[in-house]
Amino acid sequence: MSSDFLDLLFHPDTFFARKTTETPDYLVPALIVGSISLLSLIAPYFPGLILPHTIPVTVIVTLPEIIMNVAGPFITWFLVSLCLFAICSFFSGTGTFPATFRCAGYGMLPVALVTLIEVLTSPFLSPQSVMMIPLWAIMAIIYGEFVLFVVFLVWNGYIWMAAMEKVHAIPQRYAIIAATGSLFLFITLKLIYLPIV
């Protein structure tokens, strides 16, 4: 399985060429998207769990926030898949929505990784930690997270592009258009409601 993930991240062409010939698997994409939900649930409590003596663990999270943290990544997965399918269908008659949906879920692995990084660095950005850490270090973490988010977002688009090229049998230029349109939708969803992914 680990070699599968390495292929997905670094050789998506090979990965999706192989997946199009295998029995459809929705469990792994669902686990990838589900890990984003889980990390979103953990995020508010993580700083207090790591530094219990300096940061209070009691964080109040409302029920709507919990529901959006759990459902948001799955809603995003569905909407991005719909966008990818609509654009690819415009250029090609091949490929199905279930195949697009499955591959879009695989393609969200970079989002899961950058979400993990954000959770792991969150204790350093808590109000109590900010008082003890030099300003330059805090700014380095903030700008570093932003740069990583952009890099991983482009990586995400690259994976979606490779997936659509294989699933819908379209030229790369059309797959790039589909991936770019889906990234725009992804960013819009992120801006509308930050904890959605």
Image: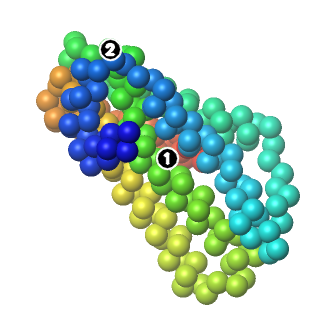
Q: Left of 123 or right of it: where is 7?
A: left
Labels 1 and 2 touching (C-beta < 8 A): no
**Residue 103: quadrant of the picture:** top left
Viewed as shown, does residue 158 lie left or right of 125?
left
Say which amino acid is labelled 1. Ala
- Which is nearer the eye, 14 or 98? 14
Q: Quadrant of the N terminus?
A: top left
Residue, x 53% and y 73% (percent of image)? Answer: 141
The quadrant of the image that shows the C terminus is top right
Q: Where is residue 91 in the image (x, y as percent from the top left)?
A: 21, 21
Image side of residue 128 versus residue 18, left or right: right
Q: Kindly report the distance in space between the C-alpha atoms of the residues bearing marks 1 and 2.
A: 25 Å
Q: Residue at x 54, y 54 (%)?
A: 116
Instruction: Report the residue at 42% width, 61% height from top.
Output: 148
Element at badge 1?
Answer: helix
Residue 128 screen position, x and y as percent: 76, 76
Circle 2 residues within 10 Å: few <14, some 14–19, many ≥20: few
In what element is the residue under mark 2?
loop
Which circle's residue, 1 or 2, is located before the other in the chain? 2
Q: Mark 2 points at which residue?
A: 96
- The residue at the far left in this view is 171
Which is more foreground, mark 1 or mark 2? 1
Q: Residue 112 carries which label?
A: 1
Residue 36 is situated, as x and y percent measured from the top left of the image, at 56, 43
Which quarter of the figure has residue 151? bottom left
Residue 8 versus residue 75 in the image, above or below: below
